[in-house]
Amino acid sequence: MKARAFDYVRPHSVEEALQAFANADGDAAYIAGGQSLVPALALRLQAPALLIDIARLEELHGLSVIGDHLRIGAATRHFEILNSGLVRTHAPLLSKAASFVAHPAIRNRGTFGGSLALADPASEFPAMSLALGAEIEIASLAGNRSVAAADFFLGLYETALQPGEMIRAVHVPAATARTYCAFDELARRRGDYALVGSGINAEIDNGRIERIRIVFLAVGSTPVQAKNVENLLIGNCLTPELIRKAQETLEADLDPPGDEQTPAEMRMHLARVLLGRLLGRLEATP
């Protein structure tokens, strides 16, 4: 199958791109990395009359520290997240997750903002944005607005983005000397979609957990935060007994779907194993 015939424009600014979308009466799509959009076009799952290329807009690129936040431009590519010293220092959880994102060919083209906008529940970056408490900066003709990651992912491939809006940047609270994190996922082969994945971002002082976010991917229609487990852990020091209790508590947070290859019970078991593994890493951190 081939994509429907479409017009193509390459605007010179975000505002020009937004106006082009409005002028097309909504029958348009933005393209940056195109790792999800191009296959959708080929299958005619999407068939816009106009393709708006935002890949080269400088204002959508780059990594910088602004105050106590790391700013990630929406068109920043996955490989830049993986290789950036700024990300390793100020958002180490993203660095740990980035190496699990698909394959090098996809990481070379895929964009950070595109991953969040697609909102694939098995994707690493949306889940880790939630774990980090990120704020998503959204551009529209009416101006910019900011949406917390916790309010951005609404359902399966559904976000808080309104028609014509685009992600301009993502703002991540910068890590401190008390920040500890861990990430891992289980898949049949490296680069495949995860059967289950999880990331933890925590503030630990003298061994005691002050704040913690635990987020799972591939266990629901959106990234899932394990709030009951978090509440159990806050204020305590990690011990093998507490980790076992956290694994038992996880059933109150997750209700993963099953399929012919991975029954729900198996996915839940894998999630418990993964949680124990990641909390064990935090426990072993000096």
Image: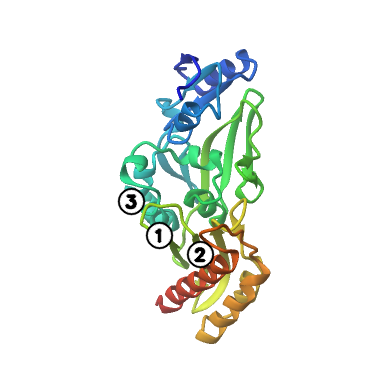
Task: Measure how far apart labels 1 and 3 are at the Cα level.
Answer: 30 Å
Q: Amino acid at mark 2?
A: Ile
Display colour scheme: rainbow
Q: Give the SS element for disc 1.
A: loop
Q: Amino acid at mark 3?
A: Gly
Label disc, if present, on residue 200 of the rendered structure? 2
Please report whichever mark, 2 or 3, sits nearer to the chain's N-terminal start: 3
For label 1, count other residues whose C-alpha is less than 10 Å away and answer few (under 14), some (14-19) or many (20+). Answer: few
Tell me whether circle 1 and circle 2 mark residues in contact (CB < 8 Å).
Answer: no
Task: Measure how far apart labels 2 and 3 are at the Cα level.
Answer: 20 Å
Query: Could you say which is closer to the camera, residue 24 or residue 186?
Result: 186
Residue with the mark numbered 1: 188
Query: Could you say which is closer to the camera, residue 96 or residue 84?
Result: 96
**What x and y, as percent, mark residue 137?**
57, 38
Residue with the mark numbered 3: 85
Please report whichever mark, 1 or 3, sits nearer to the chain's N-terminal start: 3
